[in-house]
Image (cartoon, grey):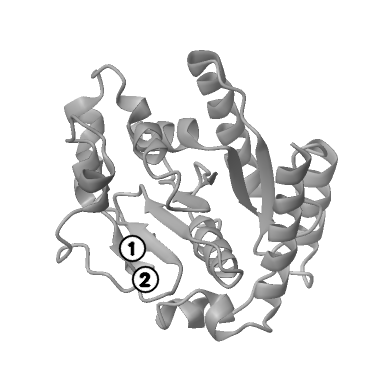
Amino acid sequence: MIIWCIANQKGGVGKTTTAITLAGLLSMKNRKVLLIDTDPHASLTSYLGYDTNSINSSLFELFQLKNFNPKKISSTIIKTNIIGIDIIPGHISLATLDRAMGNKGGIGLILKKTLSTLNEYYDYVMIDCPPIFSIMMVNALVASDRILVPVQTEFLAMKGLEYMLHTLEIITKTCRKSFKITIVPTMYDKRTLASFQTLNELKKVYIRKVWNFAIPIDTKFRDASVRNLPISHCYPSSRGVLAYKELLLYLERLNLNE
């Protein structure tokens, strides 16, 4: 099972879009994918059409478990309407974990323990992170094989990237775990000088970490979200899908070479 975490401490950079689009493309290749929504705002859960006030259980319930076994964990998993994709939904109650359980020993390993029991059930796991440093982000980072950091191709987003990489350095020292990082330029608009210059700066400064291409601006992403579907399932020939296909091929090659 391959676990990818999509994280950035800046909002609006394409984290949820990246998670759902990669999941959609993998499901079309007959891969079994588990989505995990660690954001209290539950954007990924809402994207798929779920009302977080109506679901019976969420990721929050996992943090109340004392014994981690597939039966208990499966009660938090929802089978979506998309073949091959399940989700552990997010919920606003996740926002209380830092205050209620922040000093509890081993709190940063809950997600890792959970996923270790699901290894035989899924090929890939996509963890969508909140845009703030929290227990949920720590759990997601520690549990992951690779960190995908979407970065909007504008100069202000570069500062958010610096914060994110600094956070990873801190966790590396604390948890003694080295992270495999892939920076994913997003929302690229070839018509603007700002996008062009930012993409070039990313490639120059982070040459060993950045994907060499970019996800373009595409209104079909918004249209797909209205339909509660990955863009690959409703607009398969769109620019956005073609770009994410290239990203997925790149990530798969990285996995093979590691």
Q: In the rendering, which numbered label is found on residue 48?
A: 2
In screen coordinates, is 37 left or right of 24?
left
Name the kind of residue labelled 1 in the image.
Thr
Residue 254 in the image: x percent, y percent?
75, 45
**Residue 154 found in image quarter:** bottom right
- The residue that appears at 85% across and 41% down in the rendered structure is 204
Separation (CA) of disc 2 from disc 1: 5 Å
Q: Is residue 13 above or below residue 164?
A: below
**CB under 8 Å between discs 2 and 1:** yes
Indicate the secondary structure of the residue bearing disc 1.
Answer: helix
Res 154 seen here: no
Name the kind of residue labelled 2 in the image.
Leu
Crowd rating for badge 1 (residues with CA inside 10 Å; few <14, some 14–19, many 20+): many
In which quadrant will I find the C terminus? Answer: top right
Indicate the secondary structure of the residue bearing disc 2.
Answer: loop
Question: Which residue position is annotated with label 1?
Answer: 45
Q: Is residue 140 above or below residue 155?
A: above
